[in-house]
Image (cartoon, helix red, strand yellow):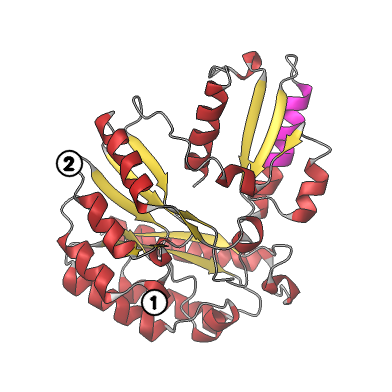
Amino acid sequence: MNIADSERIATMLEKMGYTKTSNESEADLVAIIMCSVRQSAVDRVHWLAEKFRRMKNSPKTILTGCILQKDKKIFKEKFDQVWDMQDIDGFLEIMPRHSSQPATYVPIMTGCNNFCSYCVVPYTRGREVSRPAKKIVKEIKLAVKDGAKEVWLLGQNVNSYKDKKVKFPELLKMVDNIPGNFVLNFTSSHPKDFSDELIDIMAKCKKLSRDLNLPIQSGDDKILKKMNRPYTVAQYKNLVKRIRKAIPNVRLSTDIIVGFPGETKKQFENTVKVLKDIGYGVAFINKYSPRAGTAAEKMKDNVSWAEKKRREKVLIDLINAKHKK
């Protein structure tokens, strides 16, 4: 999503007369797209703010993206301009130039209605808003004509996309039917909205990649409930079974948070078991860190950082061991 936002901002600035440079020391203007999912990303923005402030060319700076209100007040003193996420969403209809890019990243919706207890997205990007299907198809046709070989449909929860009568399965079929030689991908998916209709259409799509990211976040039902993830491990496994039956060559990846407030060693071992049972090719492991304004911020963060790192390593080693076989 940050790549798509960056492309649209760059296109807008080019239309205003700016030209790109790969040399920071030549820049008159620098725009940073921020992510607040992890504290490490926020810390990096603080570092970048100081870096650009000290540069001899003294570039003007813009900060935008997913910014928490508490951070926005601080960053307004460090950046020349801080743009709200709604300002960026207004750039969705700006057609980025794709001629030199092998991949095109196309937001089909923005925002989220799920309110997972650890996530800031509903507070920084707002509620779900879907783009018109005709505009999405038009943008992809232009990108493919310009030489794009890979198309990514993006959204905080693509499965809940809806434009009038066009829902995500239908949109996927429309894009798959676009003439041209390209590979189709999408992210991110929520298990609760992964319908049998979507599975059926995915199986029939000719251009759709067989790589699928399906975040589980935890392998323990009680932790999933605390995360406000409205499915059980059994329901998730059943979904995986249906997907693999319809698409035998699917390659699954997932997202997992370790050290969520109250996660016991036994509950973590349930996550280890799920990884072994499902056999993901890739797992993106994140150590829990409190996010201001979320429901989880009010929970006691009682898993030490050292223990979070240990649990992260256990899962990473498990995935790496699978690759060595």
In the displayed structure, would residue 148 be above or below residue 298?
A: above
> Mark on residue 136?
none
In the displayed structure, would residue 46 be above or below residue 250?
A: above
Q: Secondary structure at mark 1?
A: helix
Q: Which residue is mark 2?
A: 179
Q: Which residues are magenta?
A: 45-54
> Can the viewer see residue 211 in this picture?
no
In the displayed structure, would residue 57 be above or below residue 172?
A: above
User: Would residue 74 be found to the left or right of residue 127 on screen?
Assistant: right
Q: Nearer the viewer, residue 80 or 35?
A: 80
The prevailing secondary structure element of the residues shown in magenta is helix
The residue sitting at 73% across, 28% down in the picture is 51
**Residue 102 drawn at (x, y percent):** 31, 32
Q: Secondary structure at mark 2?
A: loop
Q: Residue 37's quadrant in the figure?
A: bottom right
Q: Which residue is mark 1?
A: 274
User: Would residue 141 be found to the left or right of residue 65 on screen?
Assistant: left
Q: Of circles 1 and 2, which is in front?
A: 2
The residue sitting at 64% across, 53% down in the picture is 36
Q: Quadrant of the C terminus?
A: bottom left
Mark 2: which amino acid? Pro
Q: Nearer the viewer, residue 5 or 24?
A: 5
Residue 302 among those drawn in magenta: no
10 Å crowding of disc 1: few (<14), some (14-19), many (20+):
some
10 Å crowding of disc 2: few (<14), some (14-19), many (20+):
few
**Residue 217 drawn at (x, y percent):** 49, 70
Q: Residue 182's quadrant in the figure?
A: top left
Q: CA distance from mark 1 to mark 2?
A: 40 Å
Assess whether mark 2 and mark 1 are in contact (beta carbons under 8 angstroms).
no
**Residue 257 drawn at (x, y percent):** 54, 67
Q: Nearer the viewer, residue 93 or 53?
A: 93
